[in-house]
């Protein structure tokens, strides 16, 4: 593994050919400033970007309209559904769904058994999220406004403190902070398998520029 970043970052956002992130900078007067950066995989270069470049990468073409309506652009995770609706999911379970013009079409709170879900992996007009406190992965149907499937949870040990989720092809990749593992779910048969294991908690997994990356407690690494 090659360490790419060894300092604390926020708003990690995979994009075509690389990823974007926010680095907090403490000013002399004690206030914290947000600096925006992009990393290009092909050249292994880090460069400053504008916040508007970051917002467009995160929220899509209607980013100005969406940003004017939300409470926090850093801590939410976003995904685009097959109907071009953009979904925002916050760690406390708050959810916002916006149409292609950036108009809010639904807001609510995503919970399973009264426990907040977090993260988003789009699947048609539905999306997958994790429920860290219940060690579960759920699928939420936006048309029906309900959880339509749960994997793990209860007495199952398939997931241990799952904190993030992404989808590539027909597989979901779930980072388990409690077991230091990235595990997968194959959507064809919903089989759960080990994919990666580390010596410390794993927080994020993603692919950019045909390279694999993980964010661990100690930093961001290219595999």
Image (tube, helix red, strand yellow):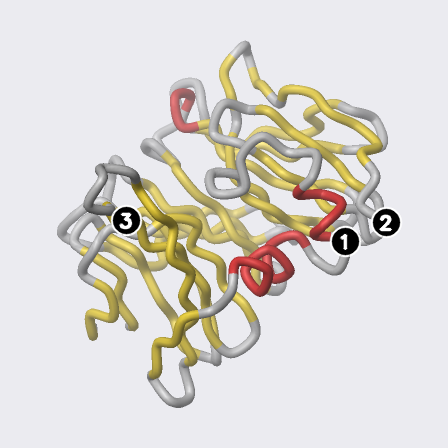
* Left-right relation of 22 to 223: right
Q: Which mark is residue 101?
A: 2
- Mark found first going from the N terminus, 3 or 1: 1
What kind of element bears circle 1?
loop
Residue under numbered circle 3: 202
> Where residue 45 sits in the image (x, y, percent)?
35, 82
Q: Quadrant of the N terminus?
A: bottom left
Secondary element type, mark 3: strand
Q: Position of residue 96 (x, y in %)?
A: 69, 32
Viewer-side label of 3, 1: 1
Q: Does label 3 or label 2 sit earlier along the sequence? A: 2
From what the image shows, is residue 169 above or below residue 104?
Answer: below
Cα gap from disc 3 to disc 2, whole angstroms: 35 Å
Closer to the eye: label 3 or 2:
2
Q: Which residue is mark 1?
A: 62
Q: Are marks 1 and 2 in contact (CB under 8 Å)?
A: yes
- Give the image location of residue 92, x and y in percent: 49, 23
Q: x and y percent of residue 167 in the render?
A: 57, 56
């Amino acid at each position: 593994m090659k360490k790419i970043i060894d300092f604390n970052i926020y708003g990690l956002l995979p994009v075509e050919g690389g990823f974007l992130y926010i680095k907090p900078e403490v000013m002399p007067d004690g206030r914290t400033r947000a600096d925006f950066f992009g990393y290009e995989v092909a050249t292994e270069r880090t460069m400053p970007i504008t916040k508007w470049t970051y917002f467009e990468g995160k929220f899509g073409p209607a980013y100005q309209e969406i940003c004017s309506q939300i409470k926090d652009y850093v801590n939410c995770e976003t995904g685009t559904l097959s109907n071009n609706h953009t979904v925002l999911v916050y760690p406390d379970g708050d959810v916002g769904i916006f149409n292609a013009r950036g108009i809010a079409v639904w807001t609510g709170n995503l919970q399973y058994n009264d426990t907040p879900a977090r993260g988003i992996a789009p699947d048609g007009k539905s999306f997958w999220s994790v429920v860290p406190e219940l060690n579960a992965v759920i699928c939420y149907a936006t048309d029906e406004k309900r959880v339509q499937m749960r994997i793990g949870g209860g007495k199952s040990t398939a997931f241990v403190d799952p904190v993030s989720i992404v989808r590539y092809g027909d597989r979901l990749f779930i980072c388990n902070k409690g077991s230091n593992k990235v595990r997968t779910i194959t959507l064809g048969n919903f089989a759960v398998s080990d994919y990666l294991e580390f010596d410390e908690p794993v927080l994020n997994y993603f692919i950019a520029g045909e390279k694999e990356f993980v964010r661990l407690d100690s930093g961001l690494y290219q595999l």
